Structures are given as C-alpha cells and as structure tokens.
Image: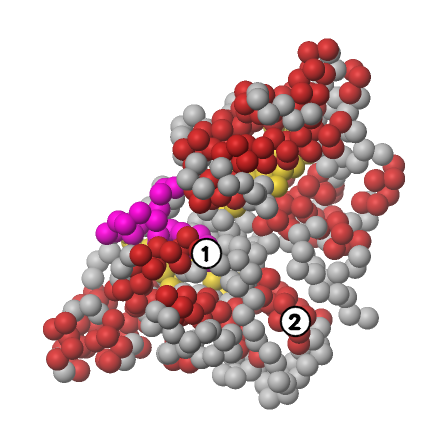
C-alpha cells in the first residue's frame, strides 16, 4: 500500500501517520559528529525543507516530559539512518530543547511587532513550565518567569533576556546542556522592513540572540534557519560567529536539503510514476528529464565541489500528489512561487531599471552570468534602494531561490552554445548588432579567455518553474496578458 504524500513541517506527525518521507536524518549524525560547532545559521530557499528538518532535530534530541509522550515518540526514528549508529542513539531523547518559530509574523507597527514577539515568548514559557519542577525555582526566578508568561508588555529588558533566563532555569533541572532551535528568524525582520521599523526591531532581535548564544557554556548547539542572512551582522551579536550554511557554501549539510537525483528516482518508483515512452533517464521528453528541467537545476557548493541537479522538494511532492500511478499525460504545474508573491521585489522592479539590467536580461534568456558576490557580507536591510550595483538585489534573488550557482565549466559551455542572435540581443553592446558571425565568435572567445577575480561567482536561473514566474512578473509589470501556468514563455524550450 502506497504511503500518503506529505508537504507539511511536522516530522513526528508525518512519521506517526505513515506519510512518505525522504530520510534526511543524516543531518542529525552530522551535528553530533561536529561537537566543536556551537551554532549554525542555515539559509535555504523557501520550501526546501528547513522547517521539516528543524522539527526532525527537535523530535530526536528533546527529552519527553512523561511516559505518554515517550510512547508517542519512541518509534519515530526506527529504521532511519540515524538509528543505525549506536553513538547517535546515546543522544536520543536526552536534552531540553528551546524551540521558536517566527513564521506568521503579524504587525503593522513597532508595538504590534513587539507584542508578537512577547506572545510567542510567553507561549514558550507556558509550554516549558510543564517540563520543569517550577516550585523549585527561587522566588526571584518565579517572579520573572510569571512576568514573561503573563506578557508584561512594558519590560523590553525582560523580553531581551527571556531566552537566556530560560536557559539558566533549565540548567537547574537538567544535568545536560540544552539546545536552541529558531525557525524562520528572518520573518520578523522582513516584516519590520515592510513596516519601516527595522531600525527599532533589529536591535531587539540581535540582543535576544546575543544573550542566548554568546559565551554560553551550557549550550550544546543551536540552529537558526531562514531564507536570508541579514540583521545579525554586529560583532556584538551572538550570531556573528555562527557557522553559516547556504547553497553558496555548505560544508556540512549539502545533501540534507532538496532532493537528489537518486532520491527523485526512489520517489517516482514508490508512487509508480513511469513513462510509457521512456527507455532511459535522459531521454529528451521522458518524465525524469522533464522534472529536471521543471523543478531541478539547483546546485550547492560544498567542501567536495559543486553538487548539481538538486530538486525543489515541495514542487516535486506536489507533482507526485497529482500524478501518482500515471504512465503518461503528466501534469507539471508551478507550485513554488504563487501562494506568496514578493511584493517588495515586484515594487522594486516596477520603480527601477533593474528589469532592463543587462545581466538580468541575460539570465532571462538562459545565459549564465558572472557576478561579484561577497558571501560573507549579509544582505543590507535597505536592499531595495536604487543602487547602480544592485549588489543586494542579486543576493536576495539568490537566497530566495530565483538563482543558483554554476561552475566555470557550465559558464564556458553556455557561451559556446549561445547562438549569434541571442548574443546580439543580450550583450548590451550596440556595436555587436551590426557585425558578422566571425566577429561574434571573436567576442565569444574573449569571454572564454577572460580572467575572473576571486570574488566572481557564476549564476543561472535553475529551472522552468522559476523562469516562468520571473517572466510572469515582468509581463505583469508591463501590463501584458494575465499569466497562465501552462503558457510557454519566450525562449523557454531553448533554455531548458
């Protein structure tokens, strides 16, 4: 009997209800094997498995509060990769875990955003009260705990110190160190940018993190996830020395997010999706090749080189949901972008000349471009300002998943295969419009022989799903016809 498709974020629920999950528990093994790393900042595109993996980590390490909870959780990891190593299982259900999720932030001004933070911290304290012997706290700790739990909205200092205070309380009841997991940390910062109160909200977030993470000997490890790396760049922030992991550089978890080629094959086999015409994996119109063009194409730079052909997991599972047990007439829809459109980016494109930027046009036409890109520098909060370099816009496009990294070999192959007409259109050099093919070839050769500086990185649009959305966005800004997900945009068949 086939398992059900799951696209949610609750690991225990999915496991207990017998949903189909790709085993990513190797991530737990890697955390255990790198005890020298105290905290990770993991930035991945939306719907790439960040929340599900964080839920998985929580379920593995968190100590159950009673036998009933222990029974509910006991078999969640049976048969998974992490359970096959006895060293890993020594850490199973052993630690107090502090878990926060900033998803769903609401607030139209500073007061409302502050109250949102107070509310989620208050809920955390209410839930944690059941996990400690509260009456054993001293009177001062009881007073502060109750004040936080009861939402004292006038005491910012108490909010800032709340996680640090909870850590000190937990340490009194557990002989082991504790774990801090924070999901979608950047959502509260993004919302504060939209409401023009970033300058007030950001110092509060940074100080909460600093109090919780900086110089904390009782912390076993911490994981913070989000889409963007920004808002935590001060040397006083506890997150300043986080080990940063993204698709641009990830020496630890490069195979823990998205789906690999082998994982895709297993998924298709499990749900009996085969192509009646397909005789090999790379046949031009076979389902595997169509899925690669539609939802794959992402790459991750790791310590062993660039890992290629990573698939957007959400889109793949939504495809499977619609097409299981099919042998033809597959429906490849767009799933990734449309539920929440990037209004801020849309407004920027509308009010600037970025959509006419030569390199952006090159990307829309299937070319790989070279960009100066400082990985260690965070995205500036005012990234949508009019700036001729557009340096932070490129970062936002990459970290959001609209772009992915390519290597030099791909870049050169892309130049060789680009036809003369396309080079004339996208080169931004008017003189090329009138020259012949020999001179075009000379232009190509110059590009191939050009020496790049160390901070140059190659980027491309990963797949059709992203390309169609970007074309839709540009069309919408130019008041063209309403977008339809099945519509072919110019050059797409040539690009992918």
Numbered label attached to residue 117: none
| Residue 10 in picture, x, y percent from top left | 70, 50
Q: Residues within 10 Å of mark 2 (few under 14, many from 20)?
A: many
Q: Is residue 383 magenta?
A: yes
Residue 76 vertical placement versus 317 (above, below): above
Q: Earlier in the sequence, mark 1 or mark 2?
A: 2
Q: Residue at x 65, y 71 (%)?
A: 320
Scheme by which the image is coloured: secondary structure
Q: Position of residue 82 (x, y in %)?
A: 70, 48
Does 287 sit above or below residue 351? below
* Residue 404 placement (x, y as % from top left): 42, 60
Mark 1 packing: few (<14 Cα in 10 Å), some, or many (20+)?
few
Mark 1 and 2 residues: CB-CB less than 8 Å, in contact? no
Q: Is residue 437 left or right of residue 202?
A: left
Residue 488 point in image, percent of width and height: 45, 79
Q: Quadrant of residue 91?
A: top right
Q: Which residue is mark 2?
A: 320
Report the span colored magenta: 380-401
Kind of element beneath mark 2: helix
Residue 342's label in the rendered image is 1
Residue 228 forms part of the magenta stretch = no
């Amino acid at each position: 009997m086939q398992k059900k498709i799951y696209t949610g974020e609750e690991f225990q629920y999915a496991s207990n209800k017998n949903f189909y999950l790709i085993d990513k528990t190797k991530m737990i093994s890697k955390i255990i094997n790198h005890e020298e790393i105290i905290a990770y900042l993991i930035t991945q595109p939306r719907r790439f498995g960040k929340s599900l993996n964080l839920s998985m980590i929580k379920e593995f390490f968190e100590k159950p509060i009673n036998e009933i909870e222990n029974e509910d959780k006991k078999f969640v990891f049976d048969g998974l990769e992490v359970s096959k190593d006895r060293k890993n299982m020594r850490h199973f259900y052993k630690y107090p875990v502090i878990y926060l999720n900033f998803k769903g932030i609401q607030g139209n001004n500073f007061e409302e955003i502050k109250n949102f933070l107070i509310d989620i911290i208050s809920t955390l304290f209410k839930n944690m009260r059941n996990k400690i012997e509260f009456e054993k706290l001293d009177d001062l700790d009881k007073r502060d705990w109750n004040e936080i739990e009861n939402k004292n909205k006038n005491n910012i200092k108490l909010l800032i110190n709340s996680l640090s205070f909870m850590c000190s309380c937990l340490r009194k009841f557990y002989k082991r160190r504790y774990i801090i997991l924070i999901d979608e940390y950047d959502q509260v910062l993004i919302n504060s940018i939209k409401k023009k109160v970033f300058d007030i909200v950001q110092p509060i977030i940074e100080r909460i993190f600093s109090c919780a993470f900086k110089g904390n000997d009782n912390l076993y490890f911490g994981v913070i996830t989000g889409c963007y790396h920004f808002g935590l760049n001060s040397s006083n922030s506890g997150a300043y020395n986080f080990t940063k992991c993204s698709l641009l550089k990830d020496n630890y978890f490069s195979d823990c997010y998205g789906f690999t080629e082998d994982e895709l094959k297993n998924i298709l086999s499990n749900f009996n999706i085969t192509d009646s015409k397909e005789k090999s994996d790379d046949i031009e119109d076979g389902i595997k090749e169509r899925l690669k063009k539609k939802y794959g194409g992402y790459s991750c730079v790791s310590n062993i080189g660039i890992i290629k052909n990573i698939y957007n997991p959400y889109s793949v599972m939504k495809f499977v949901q619609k097409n299981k047990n099919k042998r033809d007439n597959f429906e490849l829809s767009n799933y990734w972008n449309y539920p929440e459109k990037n209004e801020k980016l849309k407004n920027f494109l509308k009010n600037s000349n970025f959509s006419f930027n030569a390199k952006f046009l090159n990307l829309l036409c299937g070319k790989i471009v070279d960009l100066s890109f400082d990985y260690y520098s965070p995205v500036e909060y005012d990234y949508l300002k009019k700036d001729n370099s557009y340096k932070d816009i490129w970062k936002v496009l990459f970290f959001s998943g609209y772009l992915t990294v390519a290597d030099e070999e791909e870049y050169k192959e892309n130049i060789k295969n680009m036809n003369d007409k396309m080079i004339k259109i996208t080169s931004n050099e008017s003189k090329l419009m009138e020259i012949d093919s020999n001179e075009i070839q000379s232009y190509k050769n110059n590009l191939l022989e050009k020496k790049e500086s160390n901070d140059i990185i190659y980027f491309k649009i990963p797949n059709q799903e992203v390309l169609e959305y970007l074309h839709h966005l540009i069309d919408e800004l130019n008041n063209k016809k309403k977008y339809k997900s099945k519509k072919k945009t110019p050059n797409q068949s040539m690009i992918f």
